[in-house]
Amino acid sequence: MSGLTIGDLSARTGLSVSAIRFYETHGIVHPVRNAGGHRRFGAHDLRRLSFAMIAQKLGVSLAQIAEQMAHLPVHRAPSKADWTRISEGMRDDLNARIGVLERLRDNLDGCIGCGCLSLEACRLYNPQDAVAADGAGPRTLIAD
């Protein structure tokens, strides 16, 4: 039986062996076992782990990632169509995250509607914390 060892996968992804095992318990990768009981991974598991790493870095929960990955084939490389389905399933959430990040980037040095009123701009954009009537938190960044 061929395939990548967990050490090979660790070296290629930069993840620790324990992290790969963790991802395995969450259904991100599905190794097969050889006659000696050792895990063997397909090359497609590199992409699965890389996707999970990037998505987590962007704040997507492991549960959301696993939910999307559940739609991929287990022991073969996903096709472009398989990845397109995942992309479409995540598009709205990712666009919303991008919007919040853009608003944070563009407004961090000004009033974000948090109620602190510590900047001169806050007194102009949010007098007497009027934005609080719209809900809790930094309303100009996470407005519904």
Image (cartoon, rainbow, N blue to C red):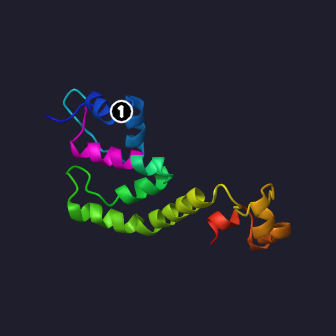
Q: Main secondary structure of the magenta part?
A: helix
Q: Nearer the viewer, residue 36 or 121?
A: 121
Badge 1, how many Cα within 10 Å: few under 14, some, many 20+?
A: few
When the figure is inspected, residue 31 is found, relative to residue 108, above or below; the finding is above
Is 50 part of what is drawn in magenta?
Answer: yes
Q: Which residue is mark 1?
A: 14
Residue 27, visible in the rendered structure = no
Residue at x 26%, y 62% (from the top left corner):
82
Residue at x 21%, y 34% (from the top left corner):
4
Residue at x 39%, y 30% (from the top left corner):
16
Q: Nearer the viewer, residue 33 or 77?
A: 77
Q: Number of marks in the image?
A: 1
Magenta part of the protein: which range?
A: 39-53
Quadrant where the N terminus is found in the figure:
top left
Q: Position of residue 34 (x, y in %)?
A: 20, 32
Quadrant where the C terminus is found in the figure:
bottom right
Is 132 part of what is drawn in magenta?
Answer: no
Q: Position of residue 50 (x, y in %)?
A: 34, 45
Q: Position of residue 117 (x, y in %)?
A: 81, 59
Q: Position of residue 112 (x, y in %)?
A: 69, 61
Q: Secondary structure at mark 1?
A: loop
When the figure is inspected, residue 123 is found, relative to residue 53, above or below; the finding is below
Q: Is residue 60 toward the left or the right of residue 143 in the image?
A: left
